[in-house]
Image: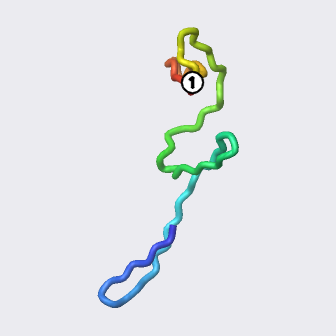
Amino acid sequence: MNSTVASQGTTSAVTTTAQYITFKLGDELFAINVAQVREVLELSQITRVPTAPDYMRGVVNVRGEGRSCS
């Protein structure tokens, strides 16, 4: 990210950098600012839930808690 700051007729360039984590879902590429990421987990086994809606793949165990996967 680059930006220019103007103040009372003078211009000075301020250069800032940002780091991004990129990932792909299907054919689409996404990027998230690394400052917004808490952690990256490896995909673990997904357990199906018999009465779950079709869009829900199941649940995964994350530190002893079940988290839904869509």
Along the viewing direction, whichever of 21 and 57 lies nearer the viewer:
57
Q: Point out the residue furthest to the left here.
A: 8
* Residue at the extreme top of the image, as rendered: 50
Give the color scheme: rainbow, by chain, secondary structure or one colour: rainbow
Name the residue rendered at 56%, 22% in the picture.
56
Compared across the picture, whether 16 is left or right of 44 comes to left
Q: Can residue 50 be spotted in the picture?
A: yes
- In the image, residue 16 lies at what x, y percent? 49, 68
Residue at 58% over, 37% down: 40
Q: Is residue 4 above or below residue 56?
A: below
- Classify residue 61 by image quadrant: top right
Q: Position of residue 4 (x, y in %)?
A: 44, 78
- Residue at horizontal 61 percent and vertical 14 percent from the top: 48
Residue at the location (69% across, 44% down)?
27
The residue lying furthest to the front in this view is 54
Q: In the displayed image of the protein, which residue is found farthest to the bottom?
A: 9
**Above or below: residue 26 compared with residue 49:** below
Query: Which of the 4 image quarters holds residue 6?
Result: bottom left
Count of marks overlaid on the render: 1
The reply to whether residue 60 is visible in this rendering is: no
| 10 Å crowding of disc 1: few (<14), some (14-19), many (20+) | few
Indicate the secondary structure of the residue bearing disc 1.
loop
Residue 39, compared with residue 5, is above or below; it is above
Q: Amino acid at mark 1?
A: Tyr
Up-down relation of residue 17 to residue 7 (above or below): above
Q: Position of residue 3 (x, y in %)?
A: 46, 73
The foreground one among 47 and 62 is 47
Residue hosting label 1: 55
Quarter of the image that includes the C terminus: top right
